[in-house]
Structures are given as C-alpha cells and as structure tokens.
Image (tube, rainbow, N blue to C red):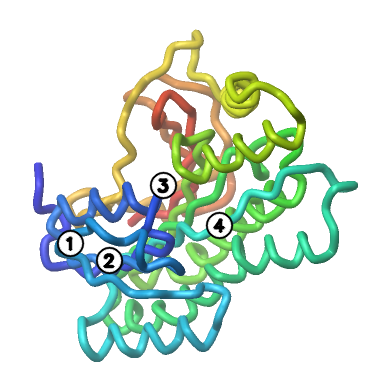
Amino acid sequence: MAGRLKGKIALVTAAGQGIGRAIADAFLAEGANVVATDLDTGKLKGLRGAVREKLDVRSTEAVEALAKDIGRNVGPVAVLVNCAGFVHHGCVLDCSEEDWDFSFDLNVKSMHRTIRAFLPAMLKRKRGSIVNIASGASSVRGIPNRYVYGATKAAVIGLTKAVAADFIKRGIRANAICPGTIQSPSLDQRIAALAKSTQQPLAAVRRSFVDWSTAALRCKGGKRRRKAIDLTKSDAKRKSTSRRKLRQSPPLPPRQRWGGDGGGGFRYQRSVLSGCSNWFVTADH
C-alpha cells in the first residue's frame, strides 16, 4: 500500500548511497516530501522528486542553517533519518585518538546536531519520528576489528533510548536500527581497501565480513527471512508501548517478535535485510 507518508516531510542524511539512498527511495515511493542530504551532492542525482541539499553533518552551523532554511521554505520535518557514518577497521591498538574523535563526531555527534536542530519543530506539532542507524556491531554484539565503530554504535543506541524516554509522552518516536552487513558502495570500498592492505583475495575478505555479521544474529534454525524493513512509520501503525518493558529477546516466530523487560517504553524487534539479522530499538506510540 503506497501513500503512507503522503504530505509528510522527511529528511535523510547521507542519502547519496547505501542505506540512506534506499530509505530516501522508499520514502519517495510512499509519497513523502523528501529532503535528501549528502556531503557529495553528486551522489544525490537520480532522486527524482526530492529536495537535494549539501550537508556536512559534522558542522553544527551547517546543520542549524539547513534546519532554518527547510522550516522557512519547505515546512516542518516530520521524519528525521540519521544515516551518516564511518566504519573504522581495527582493534584498540589500531585506533588513534584522531580515529576515535572522528568516528564519534561523525557517527554520534552528528545525530546530536540534527536532533537538536529538528526536534523543536516536531515538539511544536506534538508529533515526529526520529530514526537512527546503529549497527549489530554495538552493544548488541562485539565484532572483531570494529573497536571504535562498535563503541559509536552502542552510543547511538543509548542516545536513541534517551531521546525516546525524554519525549515519548510529547508525541516523538525514536528508533534505532541495527543492521548486519549490507551490500553498499561503502562496503565494496572497505572490502577492496582491506584486500589490498592484507593481500587477501576479494572474495575471502567479503566472506569474512558477512560471516562475522551473521554468525550470532542468524534467525532460529539458521533460516533467513527476507523481510523489508518498514521505516515509513505511518500514523496507522502507531502503537502505545509506554508500559512495555525492555529486553533483548531470543529469536521468535515471525508474528511473535516483540518483547519487554523493565525499561518502560522500549522494545526490540528482529527482522532481516538482505539475509542479515537486524535489531530495532524502538519507542513507538
């Protein structure tokens, strides 16, 4: 059913490729007025119907300026999707202070910037949806050679829970999506770089990426359920979970994925994208 986001304004960061591009395309198909941003505007070509804007999410001034411009010329943002990120490869011994600072600035602080800039308009309208892309390499699970990356994505989950707890009663939904390895230009670039630096075959490096991502997150019985992630967050699918509890539940049948344990307002959902398991940390209402 198309049109679930008709008339809603959705802003997507890093919409030029990968997960961000897929989300922007899906939102356009659902009738949203999409504001697609990227540091490289050339990557935004082909997003027909979207407002395309250059944005450096590491710049507080740029983020705040864009928020004001969109508010004046496009309208209030109803859905904010934070996709910008960087994957550092290596353990603690491979991570310099510069690597650490850059990773946290791009992967975590950028979300702080965009949420601070766009949340006030959502609060005025008493509704809004914030979607943050985290990772299975996070507090969900430790992955080899994802030291600082996993730390940043664990922080994204914590940030998302905090925003949800603070604003769930004021009409704001906050969700973190924790994907496994996803086929994207970024993945191809990282695989090629690692194969070159280690002198391993491309196929072997690619296999290692996928194996580590899916080994402990495989669905029950090892079967993969290829189900598209629904990020549309239409009004028709709003459900109150303010009394639900939080727990990381084991794999369950497709129609029994929701669970809870003492956190009030949060829940985990398990789904699959491109054969990889994904966790949703949500606070819908």
Please indicate whether residue 103 sits to the left or right of residue 279 in the image: right
Q: Quadrant of the N terminus?
A: top left
Amino acid on which the number 4 mark rests in the picture: Gly
Counting from the top left corner in percent of width and height, residue 162 is at: 57, 64
Q: Amino acid at mark 3?
A: Gly
Q: Quadrant of residue 14?
A: bottom left
Q: Is residue 28 left or right of residue 36?
A: left
Mark 2, secondary structure of its residue: strand
* Residue positioned 74% across, 27% down in the render: 199
Mark 2 vs mark 1, CA separation in Å: 6 Å
Which mark is on residue 85?
A: 4
**For mark 3, what is the residue?**
18
Residue 44 location, quadrant: bottom left
**How many angstroms separate mark 3 from mark 4 (CA)?**
11 Å
Q: Residue at x 42, y 17 (%)?
A: 224
Q: Which residue is mark 2?
A: 10
* Alpha carbon separation for disc pair 3 and 1: 19 Å
